[in-house]
Image (spheres, rainbow, N blue to C red):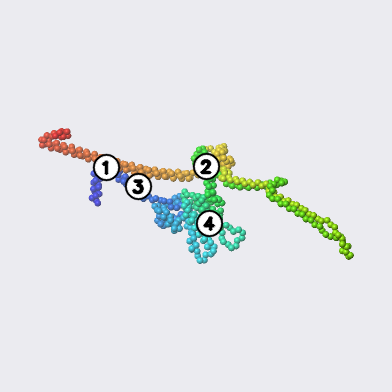
Amino acid sequence: MEKYLQQIRDWWKNLENKKKRNYIVLLISVIVLIIFFSILLSRKNYEFFIGGLDQANAGNIVTKLEEMGIEYKVDDYGNIYVANQNVSELRMRLASEGSLGYNLQGYELLQNQGFGATSYDKQVNYQIALEGELSRSIASMQSVQSARVHLVIPPRTYYQVGESPKPSASVLLVLKPGMSVTPNQIKGIINLVAGAVAGLKPESIKIVDNFSNDLSAQVALGEDISSADTKFKLKTEIEKYYKQKVESGLQSVFGLGNVVVVPEIELNWQKIEEEQRRVEPVVDENGIILSQQTRTEQSSSSPSGGVPGVDSNIPPYTYQTPTSTGNYYSSSDVITNYDVNEIYQRTIEDKSGEISNKSVTLFIDFQNSKVDDNQELRSQITKAVATAVGAPENNISLVDIRFNRDLEAMRADIEYQLQLRRQRITNIVIAIIVIAFIMMLIIIINRARRVRKVSQLVEERKRQLESRVEEAMKESGVEVEEVTPEQERDR
């Protein structure tokens, strides 16, 4: 070993200073490249694992990851990232162990009931199990990360005074980042929960997301879901149109990011059906005869009898011939049925999404826009917006408020960090290219110098050899004749 080290020392001592400098630069470049690629290859790639959890559930997941020896990191928003792992496999593994997200129990809770459990205990356990099963079913949807279902089921009693309370339910959805649920999906969740609880009506179910948005308000349960979805989209598109129309004009005055327009459009979807039936009385005999009935009755009689009194009944009897006139009766009736003059009219009035009211709220940051706030300017803005949207001036509200720029600052900081990172990577790549170019240039220059030096040595040796030959020939008395190449060819 000492022998090789001594050879290296001797070799280094015999090198020229320029070569030493070249080798030092080459060695430093190789060391820098080795360090760079070592850092690049050893750098751990963190992938998103789960987020949107409370501190208790996030702490349980962190503890489980530490027990499994998996490296992780947590950002400021509570999202958990794991390093160099198959995220899907790890998520399924923790979910099967009950360690992922909310630790919900389903119908397996009913299998662990004790022998002495009362009917109340069984009812409570059943409600908890039903909430867990519904939460699992909802969490299996594509855009939902996790879900919690809270049921309010009245206890069963044999004696009830008055109207019995109705069950109700509340659903909390934690959506995946960048995802949303459509009105059709909300309708499906409502029907899923309503179908799992006896006596639960869809109107008694409320759904909110992790941003406290009332999602159930987007669905009209009394209508067909396609019709409700179309109405909601139409309302959204109209509001979007007025928002862009007003913002584009105001931002040219106050600057980009200093104006927020919130329109509210009310659409009239009423469908009114009106029926009128008017009957005109019959005047004299002007009506239409529907039927006519005639009835005629006649009768006659000739009654018999004697002298009135008792004398005629005392013997001796005396027969007298009676004299009387007969009775005659005659009547005639005619019944005529007339049809009255009846007028029937049916009117259908369908609004079909007609705009019934418009209102616009304007939020303007006067301080950041550097525009002086005064009452005259406010009046001009209100009139201009009212004219643009076709609404009364009293439906236009203008609010001067200082905007929160934290989100913009955060975005700017993120963009700045990304720009620095890209610049750093660009600088490293440029440095590598420059170093590689310098190394190639050094190698080419050294090779050219070596070739030139060898050529110089060959020429020097040639001259030395020629001079020695001339000296030797002079000493021996031999005349030297110089011959050109042309003369050599002629010979």
Q: Check whether the beta carbons of the residues at disc 1 and disc 2 lie within 8 A of each other.
A: no
Give SS at disc 4: helix
In front: mark 4 or mark 1?
4
The residue wearing badge 2 is 241
Distance from label 1 to label 2 (Cα)? Answer: 74 Å
Give SS at disc 2: helix
- Say whether disc 1 or disc 3 marks the residue closer to the N-terminus: 1
Give SS at disc 1: helix
- Look at the image and tell me in which quarter the C terminus lies: top left
The residue wearing badge 1 is 19
Instruction: Name the kind of residue labelled 2 in the image.
Output: Tyr
Picture disc at residue 449: none
* Crowding near the residue tagged with mark 1, few <14, some 14–19, many ≥20 C-alpha atoms within 10 Å: few
- The residue at 58%/42% (across/down) is 395
Return the residue nearer the eye: 22 or 71.
Answer: 71
Instruction: Name the kind of residue labelled 3 in the image.
Output: Phe
In front: mark 3 or mark 4?
4
x%, y% of residue 323?
A: 85, 57
* Crowding near the residue tagged with mark 2, few <14, some 14–19, many ≥20 C-alpha atoms within 10 Å: few
Instruction: Name the kind of residue labelled 4 in the image.
Output: Gly
In front: mark 1 or mark 2?
2
The residue wearing badge 4 is 195
189 to 426, vertically: above or below: below
- Say whether disc 1 or disc 2 marks the residue closer to the N-terminus: 1
Return the residue nearer the eye: 344 or 423.
Answer: 344
Residue 482 in view here: no
Distance from label 3 to label 4 (Cα)? Answer: 61 Å
The residue wearing badge 3 is 36
* Crowding near the residue tagged with mark 3, few <14, some 14–19, many ≥20 C-alpha atoms within 10 Å: some
- Say whether disc 3 or disc 2 marks the residue closer to the N-terminus: 3
* Crowding near the residue tagged with mark 4, few <14, some 14–19, many ≥20 C-alpha atoms within 10 Å: few
